[in-house]
């Protein structure tokens, strides 16, 4: 299914000190502030994974914010790739996988 021109989706995987530092809750706050849809979750390998969908500028801003993260995070790497838009679902924290 093609995305409307006014929406994009980006899947990100964050590496570094990104768990046990309020990263998921911070991500939810930031994404809601930007009006994004999608989700964030911890992975058993120590990374944080997220999907951001919405206006291109807001998604790009969120990826930039993820590079900085919350106060105690130390983001070493952000892998970003096109994702599948989940539609207008809101933004949620998912269980660890």
Image (cartoon, grey):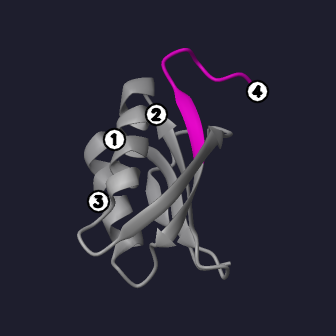
- C-alpha span from label 2 to label 3: 15 Å
Q: Is residue 20 above or below residue 18?
A: below
Q: Earlier in the sequence, mark 3 or mark 1?
A: 3
- C-alpha span from label 3 to label 4: 28 Å
Q: Nearer the viewer, mark 3 or mark 4?
A: 3
Q: Residues in magenta?
A: 1-11
Q: Position of residue 47 (x, y in %)?
A: 58, 71
Q: Is residue 19 magenta?
A: no
* Element marked by disc 4: loop
Pointer 4 residue:
1
* Residue depicted at 42% across the width and 27% down the height: 55
Q: Earlier in the sequence, mark 3 or mark 4?
A: 4
Pointer 2 residue:
54
Pointer 3 residue:
29
Q: Position of residue 17 (x, y in %)?
A: 44, 75
Q: Residue 73 falls in which quadrant of the image?
A: bottom left
Q: Is residue 51 above or below residue 57?
A: below
Q: Quadrant of the C terminus?
A: bottom right
- C-alpha span from label 4 to label 2: 15 Å
How would you rate the neighbour count of disc 4 (Cα within 10 Å): few for under 14, some for 14-19, many for 20 or more? few
Tags 3 and 4 in contact by the CB under 8 Å rule? no
* Element marked by disc 3: helix
Pointer 1 residue:
35
Q: Position of residue 38 (x, y in %)?
A: 52, 51
Tags 2 and 3 in contact by the CB under 8 Å rule? no
Magenta part, dominant SS: loop
Q: Is residue 57 above or below residue 40?
A: above
On the rendered structure, is 51 left or right of 84? left
Q: Earlier in the sequence, mark 1 or mark 4?
A: 4
Q: Position of residue 14 (x, y in %)?
A: 53, 61
On the rendered structure, is 5 left or right of 27? right
Q: Is residue 85 above or below residue 49?
A: above
């Amino acid at each position: 299914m093609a995305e409307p021109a006014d929406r994009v989706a980006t899947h990100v995987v964050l590496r570094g000190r990104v768990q046990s530092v309020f990263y998921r809750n911070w991500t939810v706050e930031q994404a809601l502030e930007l009006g994004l849809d999608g989700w964030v979750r911890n992975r058993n390998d120590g990374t944080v994974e997220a999907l951001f969908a919405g206006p291109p500028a807001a998604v790009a801003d969120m990826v930039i914010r993820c590079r900085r993260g919350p106060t105690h995070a130390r983001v070493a790497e952000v892998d970003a790739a096109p994702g599948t838009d989940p539609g207008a679902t809101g933004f949620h924290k998912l269980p660890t996988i």
